[in-house]
Image: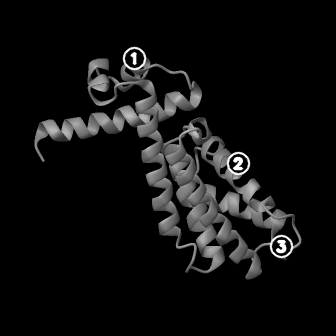
């Protein structure tokens, strides 16, 4: 890879990560403010993204790519439920730290809403399997565990920065299982 292409790739990653961080704090952050925080010229950003919405869509794409990778790595369909749960939580905590932007902001876009729903459905299927195999209590209202898990992972990512993603996953899984575990 040429030095120019390597710089462009690095700048793109920097702009997207900075955009995710700033947009998480302020959903109305401008391209100029994102470029300034990333330390790149705003023209560099505008050459790649013609609008703030286009930049936001790119941030969501890389975030969902990372979520898909975390789900795949967790092996939710094959691994023992306790192992898969920990791997999933660890992966999502890492994603939430790297790409902290709130994904519900773009749910009006069909492709993002559909992609998000596919991921939710996959995790929900795993949680049903974890319940059927006795890891989670079966007497809870439908959807209760799936409504608790995302905020636990988000809080761990945000509020436990001194812990590694694996250590934060230990806290989340312990919290989840102590409150809703089968034993």
Give percent across and percent down for residue 130. Answer: 71, 75
Q: CA distance from mark 2 to mark 3?
A: 19 Å
Q: Earlier in the sequence, mark 2 or mark 3?
A: 3
**Residue at left offset 76%, top offset 75%:** 131
**Residue at left offset 82%, top offset 64%:** 142
Give percent across and percent down for residue 51. Answer: 39, 24
Provide the residue designation for mark 2. Answer: 151
Q: CA distance from mark 1 to mark 3?
A: 49 Å
In the foreground, 20 or 64: 64
Q: Is residue 4 above or below residue 112?
A: above
Q: Badge 3, how many Cα within 10 Å: few under 14, some, many 20+?
A: some
**Residue at left offset 48%, top offset 50%:** 64
Q: Badge 1, how many Cα within 10 Å: few under 14, some, many 20+?
A: some
Toward the right, the furthest residue is: 139
Provide the residue designation for mark 1. Answer: 32
Q: Earlier in the sequence, mark 1 or mark 3?
A: 1
Q: Residue 38 falls in which quadrant of the image?
A: top left
Give percent across and percent down for residue 44. Answer: 26, 24
Give percent across and percent down for residue 59. Answer: 44, 39
Q: Is residue 34 left or right of residue 3?
A: right
Q: Earlier in the sequence, mark 2 or mark 1?
A: 1
Helix, strand or loop status at disc 3 = loop
Provide the residue designation for mark 3. Answer: 137
Helix, strand or loop status at disc 2 = helix
Can residue 90 be seen here? yes
Can residue 166 be seen here? no
**Residue at left offset 36%, top offset 22%:** 35
């Amino acid at each position: 890879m040429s030095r120019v292409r390597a710089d462009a790739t690095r700048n793109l990653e920097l702009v997207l990560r900075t955009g995710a961080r700033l947009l998480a704090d302020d959903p109305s952050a401008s391209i100029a403010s994102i470029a300034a925080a990333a330390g790149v010229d705003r023209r560099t950003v505008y050459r790649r993204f013609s609008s703030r919405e286009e930049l936001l869509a790119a941030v969501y794409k890389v975030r969902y790519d990372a979520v898909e990778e975390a789900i795949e790595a967790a092996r939710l369909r094959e691994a023992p439920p306790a192992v898969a749960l920990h791997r999933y939580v660890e992966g999502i905590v890492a994603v939430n730290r790297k790409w902290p932007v709130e994904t519900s902001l773009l749910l009006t876009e069909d492709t993002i809403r559909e992609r998000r729903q596919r991921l939710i459905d996959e995790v929900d299927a795993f949680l049903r399997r974890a319940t059927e195999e006795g890891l989670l209590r079966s007497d809870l209202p439908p959807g209760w565990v799936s409504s608790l898990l995302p905020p636990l992972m988000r809080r761990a990512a945000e509020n436990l920065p001194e812990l590694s993603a694996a250590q934060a996953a230990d806290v989340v899984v312990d919290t989840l299982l102590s409150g809703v575990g089968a034993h």
